[in-house]
Structures are given as C-alpha cells and as structure tokens.
Image (cartoon, rainbow, N blue to C red):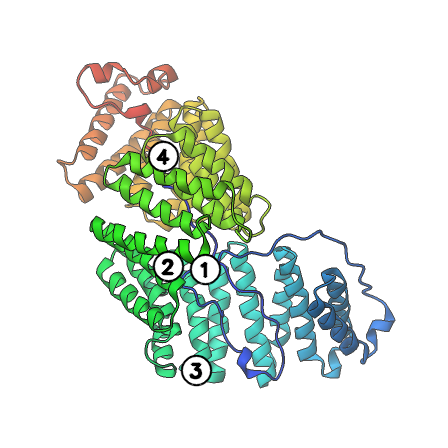
Amino acid sequence: MPGLVSVQQTPPQTPAVPIFIPGDPTRINGCSNKSPSPSNSRARPGKKTPEKVPTTDSSLEKPDLGPFLLKLARDAMASGENPHKALDYALRASISFENCSGSGHGVELVMSLHIVASIYCSLGRFEEAVPVLERSVEVTDHENGSDLALARFSGYMQLGDTYSMLGRVDKSISCYRSGLQIQIETLGESDPTVAETCRCLAEAHVQAMQFDEAESFCKKTLQIHREHTAPASLEEAADRRLLALICEAKGDYESALEHLVLASMSMISNGQDNEVAAIDVSIGDVYSSLCRFDEAVFSYQKALTVFKSTRGDNHPSVASVFIHLADLYYKTGKLRESKSYCENAMRIYAKPVPGSTSEEIASGLTEISAIYEAINEPEEALKLLEKAVKLLEDTPGQQSTIAGLEAQMGVLFYMIGMYGKARNSFGSAIAKLHSNGEKKSAFFGIVLNQMGLACVQLYKIDEAARLFEEAREILEQECGSFHLNTIGVYSNLAAAYDAMGRVEDAIEILEYILKVREQKLGTANPDAEDEKMRLVELLKDTKRTRNRKGKSLENLLDSNSNRKKEGTKKWSGFGFKN
C-alpha cells in the first residue's frame, strides 16, 4: 500500500460572507471570487465576548423594536468599530422578530440572522454561525415571494461558505447546489449570476477531488460568460484557468495548456501583467509534467522577472516561483540547483513583506518540505512542516490542512525510526479529521493504516489490529474491496492477526487477497506470488498444530528471518505494508 503523499490541499476559500439585502436582485449570485483557485485570505479569530441577550424580555416583543435594532446592527457593522456591539444588536433584533413572527417580519428576521452569522464568521466563530444560517433557511423554506427566494438563496450560499471555511466540503457542495437550484428557478439557467454559483460549485468539487463534476460546472460557467461578455474577457480567462487546473489534475495536459494559452492572451489584451505572470507559472507546471523542461524554465523565468519588477524581490510570489524551479531541477536530477532555489525561497519566507499571510507562507514551506523529503533529507522536511503547523494553528478553518501536515509528519517520523512520535502525530491528525466530519474519507482510512504501522513497531499489536480493521471498513466503503489500498490494509490486518495467534482469520484474509491479486494482476505477478508463499507457510504451521501461538514479535519484526535465508521473499516487517 503506498505511503502517504505530501498533503498540501486546503479547504476551499470563499469571499466574505454576503449579507442579504431585500429588493436587490443582483444579490442572487454566487461567489464573486474570480481567481482560478480559491483565495488564501481568512478571517482572523477575535476575542470571544459573551453576548448578554435577553430572551424573555417583554420589551423585545414590540413590533417596532426589531427594525430599530436591525438598523443599529447594520450601522455598527458598517462602522467596523465594535463587532461585538453589532452582534448584540443583531441578536436582539432576531429575537424581537421571532417574538413578532406574525407581524410580517419574515424577511427582516432572515436579514438579522444573516448579519449575526456574518459577524460570527468575521470573528472566526464559524461553528456558531452554522445553526444561525440553518435557521435562516428554515424560516424561508415554506414561504413564497421574490424577496424570500432571494433570502433563501443567500442563506444557502452563506451556509456553503461557512462549511467551506470549516473544511467540510461535502456539506458546502450540498448547500451550493441548493442555492443554484433556487437561482435557476428564479432567474433561468443562462443568467450571468448563475455562472458565479456554478463557479463556486466547480471550485468546491476541485477541493473534493471530484474533477468530472468540477469540469461540468466550469464548462457551464464558461458557456454563460461567453454568451454575456465580450470575447477574451477577464471572466472567460478566469474560467479557462480553472478548467486548465481541472484538466491538469485529470492528466489531460494538452487541454490544460490550450486553456492556459487562451487565458494568457485574454489577460494580455486587458493589460493584466501580474495575472499573465501567474498564468506563465501554470504553463511552466504543465510543460514540466510533459517533460518539456527547457520550455518550463523559460515560462518560470518570465514570471519571475515580472513578479520581481512589480512586487519586489522579497514578495511571496517570487518565493513561489523559486519553489517551482526547485521542483523542476529536482526532477531533472540537478539537486544542487534545486536546494539553492529552496534556500532562496526560505530566505523570503523568513522575513515576509507586510501583507503576507500565514497561509501562503505555510503552503510554501510545505512545498519545500516535499522537495527535501524527495531528496532524502527527512529531518529538514520535518522542521519545515513543524513551522507550517505553527503558522496555521491559530487560524480558523485550517484544521483539515493541519491534519494533513501532521499526517505527513507522522510518515517522516516513521521513516527516521521515531515510531512513538509518528504514532502521536498520526493520532493528532486523526482527532482533527474526526472533529471535522472527515472520519469516513479515504484519506482518513489511509492515516489509520499508517498509525497502525507505527503501533506495530511499538509492539502494540492489539491497537494496530483495531486500526487496520477500522481502515479496512472505511476503504472498502470509499475505494472498494478490490482497490490496491484496500488490499494493502487486508495484508496488514492478516499480519496482525497472525501475530496475535488468530491464524485462521489470517488465512481467510490471505486466501481472499490471493484470489483478488491473481484476478487483477495475474498469477505471475510478484505480489501474487508473495501472498501465495505467505499463505502456504501459514497452512503448513496450522497443519502441524491447530492451536499454534503467535510468533514472537522479535521474529516477526526481524528483517533477517530464516525465511529470507532460505531464499523465499521476506514478508517485510512481518508483512506490514506502507
């Protein structure tokens, strides 16, 4: 089973949460973010101050009090001076509208709830925003009218944005789909604002690694923009950049290159030099994937020249190009040049220019870490990942990203033989993924397997078996019983059962594995032959004694077992597969 790869994905980012304003049809739109990939900007956590909101005060039942409090909330929010005061006004307004629900205040109630949720998000309190937005959707679910349709759409979109910030992409996609359905019913399928919601869905599907769905929504976005905008528009360029990203992820590099060239031409015609440079970086990536390394270097150097002249030598965008060059020189075997570019990037990240975000610095450090890992310097890679985690730990909405980094740290600890730290790192990643609702993802199953391997090295076989069992269940559900990752976990579980003395269970699993490997890979495949030898060995043991005890761990973990001396292929690490 393949080991974990460097995890760099971050939850999809969305623009600031919009506030519903009744009577303004232009608000029935999706994300206004025009970039081909999610933004890295995030709300910073604010100091949490308890709100003193009376829930039974009879004064809040006066029909004219709600609109007054709502106006105070909007004014306080617009001033930006005291978000907690604005939150207090908005909460009291929503209670007043709830108490006077029969007075025709439905739209105003939704507006107050949206303001409450928006302030929670601005304070980094995304979990508290979720039930407020769910209530705003519930209020409008069974009522009609254009304003209420607008309110319902806005509620779904804000809820999708909030789930996105929490890293719960599946729920985010579901909310965006509900919003899109309302929008289409209200405005039709070809309205320009429908394109923005389709783009939100495309970006969310990219984050979920559902590239076919992402491509479908992105093509719909491009189709609508081409109907309503001039040729070579900025909107069309943004759509093509996202399509290129999707095509590249699917391995269709030629199509990706075509979209990027067209996007670059659009940006050139609109005088967007920095955007042209950013596209040049993407073009360099595609050339690198196609092994057209000289053309890739040329594209990167073009971008580097523009970024240095427009943003300065120490801007993170310059560091990012250095990392791309470092990766390219690693691929071509020029390790000295690769490390030199990594060091140049790290010097920039050590003294970031004002305005640099912790997210982009952490992302850059993670990419450099992957290069150091590839050139077999795991200790240096670990240091960089630790810095990245430290940068992100106080940033809301980054728990999934941190979990991925901790999982990769676990892999590196395992590689250098620090199995206790590996187990702890995997455990921390699992806890974060579990709290974010990702406990049924394939990645979660892979991390469970890796933690099980660390437990084996610590002689915690019972714990390892439980982890392998849970990983098997998840991967069967997410990948299928015949997937190689799932088969790898079966092998590890069989090894654990054998070590525990559960020989019959181990034999049953090995027989299944052998059957699958022979069907999928053929009987001459080395892996199938290896499984056959393991099964034969166990069957011989059980024939000698049905109650055979598990082999000692010293023998099971010994890389110089007698089986290896006899010329048979060793079940490495007692058959535990990374």
* N-term-proximal mark, 1 vs 3: 1
Asked if one can make out residue 489 in the rendered structure from this viewpoint, the answer is no
Task: Assess disc 2: are there few (<14), some (14-19) or many (≥20) residues with their C-alpha within 10 Å of its C-alpha.
Answer: many
Calculate the distance from the C-alpha at mark 2 to the C-alpha at mark 1. 14 Å
Q: Which residue is mark 1?
A: 38
- The quadrant in which residue 113 appears is bottom right
Q: Amino acid at mark 2?
A: Ala
Residue drawn at (19%, 34%), measured in percent from left and top?
528
Task: Assess disc 3: are there few (<14), some (14-19) or many (≥20) residues with their C-alpha within 10 Å of its C-alpha.
Answer: some
183 or 143: nearer the viewer: 183
Q: Secondary structure at mark 1?
A: loop
Q: Position of residue 189 (x, y in %)?
A: 41, 81
560 or 112: nearer the viewer: 112
Q: State the mark number for residue 278.
A: 2
* Of marks 4 and 3, the one in the foreground: 4
* 525 shown above or below 253: above
Q: Amino acid at mark 4?
A: Glu
Residue drawn at (36%, 30%), measured in percent from left and top?
377
* N-term-proximal mark, 2 vs 3: 3
Q: Amino acid at mark 1?
A: Pro
Calculate the distance from the C-alpha at mark 4 to the C-alpha at mark 2. 26 Å
Tag 4 near tag 1, CB within 8 Å: no
Q: Position of residue 276 (x, y in %)?
A: 35, 63
